[in-house]
Image: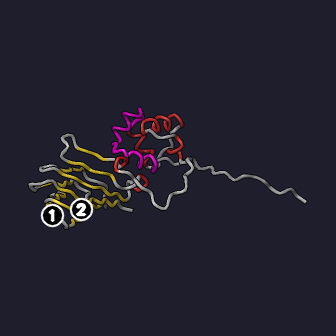
């Protein structure tokens, strides 16, 4: 009788770090240029890694992990995931936010890192005269803005629309676009960004 095989099947596929790298970079609001400078890795190499056109060396993964402040295993996808609680609470102090230099615009990032680049949602606060101005996103990306307080104007390309509290605007953002507070008091809104599948 032949002995039973105990051969272990292992994957010959190298770990793909592109999606994880892009999600971590976007969660920290870093451009390719900024991460390139922090990690000492060329922008073209970063772009190739994120598009799964190149697999980085261990040295490059180590530099990227240090620049992002995460363990190397997080980029390689080797970190065992603990069981998720039925309700995950994110305290106010743990919610990341972005502000423009003059403090007139604040964007609190409410969506989880793993959905960055697919489906994102934010709490937007605009002081009088404040604006959130953005360059074009990838083709097919749309934003959904619901005003909670104040008077806000949305500009997408050459078109503009003014919104009052309770109103929602849905618009394509594959062109330069902006959200401006055009009222006489601070404004707040929910902003949802949906990327193409």
Query: Which percent across, then down, holds residue 120?
Result: 34, 57
Category of crowding for the residue at label 1, using alpha-carbon neighbours closer than 10 angstroms: few (below 14), some (14–19), many (at least 20): many
The residue sitting at 17% across, 56% down in the picture is: 187
Between residue 115 and residue 142, name the one nearer to us.
115
Please provide the residue range marked out in magenta: 18-42
The residue sitting at 13% across, 62% down in the picture is: 162
Between residue 70 and residue 157, name the one nearer to us.
70
Quadrant the C terminus occupies: bottom left
Mark 2–mark 1 CB contact (< 8 Å): yes
Instruction: State the CA–CA distance, disc 2 to disc 1.
Output: 9 Å
Residue 5 image label: none
Does the magenta stretch mainly form a helix, a strand or a loop?
A: helix
Residue 145 image label: 2
Please give the residue where the numbered disc 1 appears in the rendered image.
Answer: 163
The residue sitting at 45% across, 45% down in the picture is: 49
Query: Which percent across, then down, holds residue 56?
Result: 50, 40
Question: Regarding mark 1 in the picture, which secondary structure is present there?
Answer: strand
Question: Regarding mark 2 in the picture, which secondary structure is present there?
Answer: strand
Q: Say which label, 2 or 1, has the lower sequence index.
A: 2
Query: Which percent across, then down, holds residue 80?
Result: 57, 50
The answer to whether residue 135 is above or below residue 156 is above
């Amino acid at each position: 009788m032949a002995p039973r095989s105990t051969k272990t099947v292992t994957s010959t596929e190298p770990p793909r770090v592109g999606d994880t790298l892009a999600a971590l970079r976007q969660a920290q609001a870093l451009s390719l240029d900024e991460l390139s400078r922090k990690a000492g890795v060329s922008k073209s190499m970063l772009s190739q890694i994120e598009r799964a056109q190149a697999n980085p060396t261990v040295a490059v993964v180590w530099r990227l992990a240090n620049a992002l402040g995460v363990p190397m295993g997080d980029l390689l996808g080797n970190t065992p995931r603990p069981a998720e609680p039925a309700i995950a609470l994110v305290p106010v102090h743990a919610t990341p936010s972005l502000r423009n230099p003059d403090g007139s615009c604040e964007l609190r990032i409410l969506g989880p890192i793993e959905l960055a680049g697919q489906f994102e949602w934010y709490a937007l606060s605009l002081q009088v005269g404040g604006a959130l101005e953005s360059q074009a996103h990838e083709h097919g990306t749309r934003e959904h803005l619901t005003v909670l307080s104040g008077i806000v104007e949305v500009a997408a390309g050459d078109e503009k629309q003014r919104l009052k509290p309770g109103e929602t605007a849905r618009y394509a953002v594959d062109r330069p676009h902006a959200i401006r507070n055009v009222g006489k008091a601070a404004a707040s809104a929910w902003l949802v960004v949906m990327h193409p599948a």
